[in-house]
Amino acid sequence: MSYKETFIHTENKHDGLIVTVMLDSVRLSNGSTAKREIVEHPGGVTVIPVDEDGNVYCVRQYRYAMGEELLETPAGKLERGEDPLDCAKRELSEETGITAKNYTYLGKMYPSPGFCRETLYAYLATGLEQGESHPDTDELLNVEKIHIDKLYRMVMDGELADAKTIIAVMKAKVVLGGV
């Protein structure tokens, strides 16, 4: 049985700075119709930079939508037509000042596929070289160095809530041979 939903009509509800909100009408596989709210987002990247001692360079920043500070892997929004790896390199440099000799693609993820057309791409960065960070003017953040084993424990203990960071830590731990 197919569960594919077929597009009928769309209505633009909001054009924002980053997202567009649409209200789509769809036909379900059983013949009935339904409404689907869709958030169009350009997508983004997350990078887990790990040094030769197993330390990860994370960023702590206030996330207004959640009303709290979160510890996260460096991340950012894709520009229109931008290659995800190029975005990963740019965001890592902007947020931490780090450049990396090696990037390993960890895969893509859909953070909220029930309503959002956002795709995030994850990378492991190694062979790190420290430079000066240069975050966007509206990015107020602190860089924190935490060993990957501690981050893994924080994930398993429920201390990290950011989904992209959880996934990046788990995948990096496997790639680096720790799980």
Image: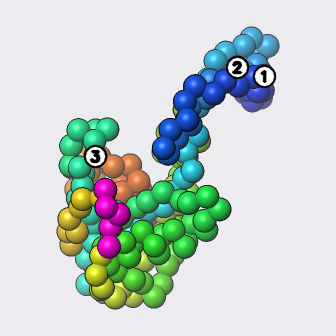
**Mark 3 touching mark 2, by CB under 8 A?**
no
* Residue at the spot of label 2: 25
Q: Amino acid at mark 1?
A: Ile
Whether residue 43 can be seen here: yes
Residue type beneath disc 2: Ser
Residue 40 drawn at (x, y percent): 58, 40
- The disc placed on residue 8 is 1
Do tag 1 and tag 3 residues touch (Cβ < 8 Å)?
Answer: no
**What amino acid type should be assigned to the residue bearing mark 3?**
Arg
Location of residue 131 by image quarter: bottom left
Residue 94: mark: none
At x 48% / y 70%, what residue is drawn? Answer: 88
Q: Measuring 45% from the left and 73% from the top, which residue is drawn there?
A: 90
Q: Quadrant of the N terminus?
A: top right
Dot 1 falls on a residue whose secondary structure is: strand
Q: Gap in Å between the C-alphas at discs 1 and 3?
A: 36 Å
Residue at horizontal 31 percent and vertical 38 percent from the top: 65
Q: Is residue 157 left or right of residue 40?
A: left
Q: Which residues are magenta?
A: 134-138
User: Residue 63: which disc?
Assistant: 3
Mark 1 or 3 closer to N-term?
A: 1
> Is residue 176 toward the left or the right of residue 15 in the image?
left
The quarter of the displayed image where residue 6 is located: top right
Q: Residue at x 23, y 61 (%)?
A: 141
The mark nearer the N terminus, 2 or 1, is 1
Q: Position of residue 21 (x, y in %)?
A: 56, 31
Q: Nearer the viewer, residue 62 or 148?
A: 62
Q: Are marks 2 and 1 in contact (CB under 8 Å)?
A: yes
Q: Nearer the viewer, residue 153 or 43?
A: 43
The number of numbered discs placed on residues in the rendered structure image is: 3
